[in-house]
Image: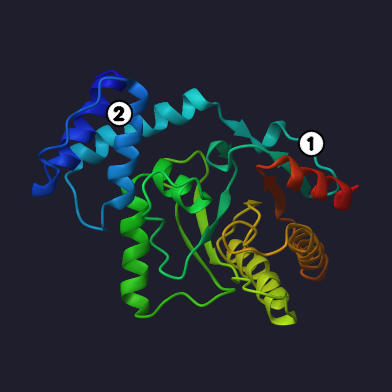
Amino acid sequence: MNQSERRNYLIDSLLEEKKEYKKILLPQSAGEQKALLRSLMNVRMAAPISEVFLQIQDEYLKEETKRKGITDIRVLKPVEEGIYLWQGDITTLKCDAIVNAANSGMTGCYQPCHNCIDNCIHTYAGIQLRNACADIMEKQGHEEPTGQAKITPAFNLPCRYVLHTVGPIVQGKLTKEHEELLASCYRSCLELADENEVKSVAFCCISTGVFMFPNERAAEIAVQTVRDYRREKNSGIEVIFNVWKDEDYEIYRELLG
């Protein structure tokens, strides 16, 4: 199968899962097909699916990521010992683990084609990631508390693991509790990474999007927490601060010198 054939198979399979999708026609353009496939993956609840589907999905997603271009941590230069700054798509980063800014449900973003990092990571990891997160949450029996972290395989992403953490939501004035919870997100991820012998971790800008944590203060907390952890624990873990927006790149560049 080529990419177009794989994409059509995946769309057809997901449309067949629900009777209400029967009137949806396959778009002609590749761009519209990609949007439809992503939407169907985004709204699909956690559930088993055939091994044939997973095999074709995995081939499709890995090829899509390859076409976007994969960046290996080994080609990056540290801005200080053990710490990197990189601007780009975190789903294309090859390192041991990337961090997902999750919500308390922990099973991803269900809004079709939403551009949040939670949606992007789940889209390109594949539906196995939602199923894995759903299993964790079922065993846990309650929503994920803010400031903690969970680890899953990365499935079709270039990294090996995904660390999921729920950042604080800032509604109104920023408080000391917000700051402590954000610092806890970074510490929890680093501790979990060390427990699982993860050697490199890429952090997104936790809580700064729809969770409304001020970008500059969030970056200050992120950098300070990572520096303190590496020093206090004598940890050799390598940390990549991953940014997408120019605004965040400038903030981290100034903080990291």
Can you give x and y, in whole percent of width and height, for residue 201 in the image? 64, 52
Q: Which residue is mark 1?
A: 77
Q: Which residue is mark 2?
A: 33
Extreme residue toward the front, this view: 172
Residue found at x 29% / y 52%: 43
Residue 107 drawn above or below residue 111: below
Quadrant position of the N terminus in the picture: top left
Lateral position of residue 222 relative to residue 127, left or right: right
Q: Residues within 10 Å of mark 1 (few under 14, many from 20)?
A: few
Can you give x and y, in whole percent of width and height, for residue 253 in the image? 84, 45
Q: Are marks 1 and 2 in contact (CB under 8 Å)?
A: no
- Color scheme of the displayed model: rainbow
Residue found at x 51% / y 50%: 116
In this view, the residue in front, 108 or 20, is 20
Q: Amino acid at mark 2?
A: Gln
Residue found at x 26% / y 58%: 46
